[in-house]
């Protein structure tokens, strides 16, 4: 009598091969509801009879396949005691038929969300595939001598494997290439017709598949350098051996992807991509409405933008909104502060580097922000702090849309939008020879000037309220607003640090306030002691702006201290970045009085 138990070893190998290729679990059940093969969580139960098996009973009785994407809630499952709490996430159950008799079932099973997505996204293809596998099993029960060839010829998977994003290659026990999917063809630029039946080492030097075949042990996501037809490939490879019926191995299946592409994907996943659009920019004053209107028009193109404005006016917020509203808003947004990174590090951070470019360079090199942002936007904050050497390299990116890694000899094309920002007077820097004139005109294709907070005073109340709600929620405090006197102090204050200073002031007040509303005593001292009335100025009292800047920085450091902590506090009080205050101290050679 024909039954699935006659070929359980073959069925287990088929299950393993399918699971390795499709990344889902497989189980095969006979007509008596005994599990004869299985992978993953059900492997340990091979040989045991199913306790319930309502879906398998249904398929055995009807001889028709079933796809269930919500186990426990399907009509077949309603009488099951596990209804609603089933540990299966999704599965396709297909009958194994022999001359109109149902011998058992073969199932593709999902135990996690990733496996469920695989089944749900490729349902029709997988149903067709598992049907073919059911036919294969039933045929091989009668033709045992042809079983090994059928397992080795896992080309039955080709229709599914070709839909996989990663490259897939298989070799037989002699190291000969038997499968090469479309993604692999695109990656290497080689048609599979030229590769099939070729020894793998003849085409792909250093491809580690023969070692897997010899040792019978696979691996996950390992980094390898592979030479193929005169070109070196940096790959991320996963490999699995295919077992045969005699305790040996019939071949190897491997998946691989470009290491740099995998690195970029990982970077995008782990990097916080804060999505902001124009509705997140608070304010309804005429000044802010005008600049938002212009920015919305700017966003529609891919032209370079130069955002100008005092420190703390929200230049990065506008840059993110322009990116989000642009044609590539779904692609990466890479911000980098040119004033916060030393020049020798900034070059490799922007352009990346090749292996061996300098002492400590990682094996295989590293892509820079321009490569990681390919297709998206690079935001260069404090562009005025960039050295003339890097300005020249940036100019080449803007002109030719190509970058050259540190230590490289080849150019890499990039499709990026560049948004730059500065609070410096670039015209004056050009005049002094501190900024390239040609780069200035390349960057300022579309200049966007952000108004300081003192020119949009109608927005102060809305900003205070927004950040009051934000920090009250963040700090779990029931603070409902500002009292009249505290609000007047905020409205009268000149806010030299702009929105950044306002945010810091609100956070300060929320931390100190213990009552239901913010009182004047909870505001920062600079707001409480600020005198808004004007004082007549004698012309002899007027000083050059540079001297005023020196005096302001020296006074702030004398007040807060010349330590690292004091400089941080002084920078916040002045409304400038910590990196800027360090640069100004060095520029003016300021010392403690």
Image: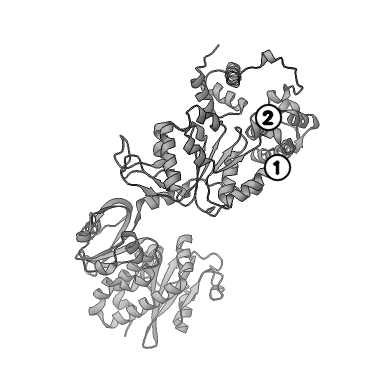
User: In the rendering, which numbered label is found on residue 495?
Assistant: 2
Closer to us: 327 or 1 = 327
User: Which sits earlier in the primary sequence, circle 1 or circle 2?
Assistant: 1
User: Residue 383, how many percent across, how many down?
Assistant: 50, 35
Say which residue label 1 marks. Answer: 283
Cα–Cα span, label 1 and label 2: 16 Å
In the rendered image, the vertical position of residue 472 relative to residue 520, given as above or below:
below
Secondary structure under the numbered disc 2 in the rendered image: loop
Residue that lies at the very extreme toward the top in this rendered image: 593
Q: Quadrant of residue 20?
A: bottom left
Q: Position of residue 119 (x, y in %)?
A: 46, 68
Going 50% across and 26% down the picture, which residue do you hit? 432
In the image, residue 17 above or below residue 544? below
Q: Is residue 484 left or right of residue 368?
A: right
Q: Nearer the viewer, residue 44 or 174?
A: 174
Q: Residue furthest right?
A: 484
Query: Which quadrant: the N terminus?
Result: bottom left
- Kindly tell me whether residue 235 is visible in this rendering: yes
- Residue 33 appears in view: no
Residue depicted at 68% across the width and 42% down the height = 288
Lateral position of residue 9 relative to residue 505, left or right: left
- 420 in relation to 191, above or below: above
Quick one: label 1, few (<14), some, or many (20+) residues within 10 Å? some
**Which coloring applies here?**
one colour
User: Mark 1 and 2 residues: CB-CB less than 8 Å, in contact?
Assistant: no
Percent x, y of residue 209:
25, 58
How many numbered discs? Answer: 2
SS of the residue at dot 1? Answer: loop
For residue 428, the mark is none
The quadrant the C terminus occupies is: top right
Label 2 crowd bin: few (<14), some (14–19), many (20+), radius 10 Å: many
């Amino acid at each position: 009598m024909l039954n699935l138990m006659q070929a359980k070893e073959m069925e287990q190998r088929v299950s393993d091969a399918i699971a390795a290729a499709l990344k889902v679990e497989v189980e095969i059940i006979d007509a008596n509801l005994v599990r004869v093969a299985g992978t993953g969580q059900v492997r340990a139960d091979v040989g045991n009879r199913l306790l319930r098996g309502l879906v398998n009973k249904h398929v055995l009785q009807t001889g028709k396949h079933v796809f269930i994407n919500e186990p426990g809630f399907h009509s077949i499952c309603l009488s099951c005691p596990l209804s609603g709490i089933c540990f299966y996430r999704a599965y396709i159950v297909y009958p194994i038929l022999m001359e109109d008799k149902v011998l058992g079932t073969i199932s593709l099973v999902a135990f996690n969300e990733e496996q469920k997505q695989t089944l749900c996204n490729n349902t029709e293809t997988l149903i067709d595939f598992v049907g073919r596998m059911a036919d294969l099993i039933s045929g091989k029960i009668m033709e045992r001598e042809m079983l090994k060839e059928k397992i080795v010829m896992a080309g039955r998977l080709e229709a599914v494997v070709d839909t996989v994003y990663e490259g897939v290659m298989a070799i037989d026990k002699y190291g000969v290439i038997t499968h090469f999917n479309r993604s692999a063809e695109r990656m290497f630029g080689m048609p599979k017709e030229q590769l099939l039946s070729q020894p793998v080492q003849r085409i792909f030097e250093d491809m580690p598949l023969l070692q897997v075949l010899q040792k019978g042990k696979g691996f996950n996501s390992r980094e390898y350098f592979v030479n193929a037809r005169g070109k070196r490939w940096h790959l991320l490879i996963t490999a699995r051996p295919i077992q045969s019926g005699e305790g040996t191995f019939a071949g190897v299946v491997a998946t691989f992807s470009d290491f740099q592409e995998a690195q970029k994907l990982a970077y995008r996943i782990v990097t916080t991509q804060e999505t902001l659009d124009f509705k997140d920019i608070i304010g309804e004053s005429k000044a802010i409405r005008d600049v938002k209107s212009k920015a919305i028009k700017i966003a529609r193109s891919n032209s370079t933008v130069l955002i100008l404005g005092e420190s703390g006016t929200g230049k990065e917020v506008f840059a993110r909104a322009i990116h989000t509203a642009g044609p590539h808003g779904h692609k990466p947004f890479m911000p980098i502060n040119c004033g916060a990174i030393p020049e020798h590090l900034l070059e490799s951070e922007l352009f990346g580097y090749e292996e061996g470019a300098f002492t400590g360079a990682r094996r295989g090199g590293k892509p820079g922000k321009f490569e990681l942002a390919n297709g998206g936007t690079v935001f260069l904050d404090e562009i005025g702090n960039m050295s003339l050497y890097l300005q020249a390299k940036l100019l080449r990116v803007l002109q030719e849309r190509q970058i050259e890694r540190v230590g490289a000899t080849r150019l890499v094309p990039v499709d990026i939008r560049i948004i730059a920002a500065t609070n410096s007077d670039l015209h004056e820097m050009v005049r002094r020879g501190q900024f390239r004139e040609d780069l200035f005109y390349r960057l300022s294709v579309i200049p966007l000037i952000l108004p300081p907070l003192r020119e949009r005073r109608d927005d102060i109340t809305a900003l205070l309220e927004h950040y009051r709600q934000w920090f009250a929620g963040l700090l779990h405090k029931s603070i409902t607003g500002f009292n009249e006197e505290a609000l007047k102090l905020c409205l009268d204050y000149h806010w030299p640090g702009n929105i950044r200073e306002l945010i810091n002031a609100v956070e300060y007040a929320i931390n100190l306030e213990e009552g239901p509303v913010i009182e004047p005593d909870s505001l920062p001292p600079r707001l409480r002691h600020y005198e808004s009335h004007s004082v007549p100025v004698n012309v002899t009292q007027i000083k050059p702006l540079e001297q005023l800047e020196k005096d302001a920085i020296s006074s702030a450091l004398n007040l807060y201290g010349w330590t690292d902590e004091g400089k941080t506090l002084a920078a916040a009080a002045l409304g400038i970045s910590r990196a800027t205050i360090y640069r100004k101290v060095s520029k003016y050679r300021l010392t403690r009085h």
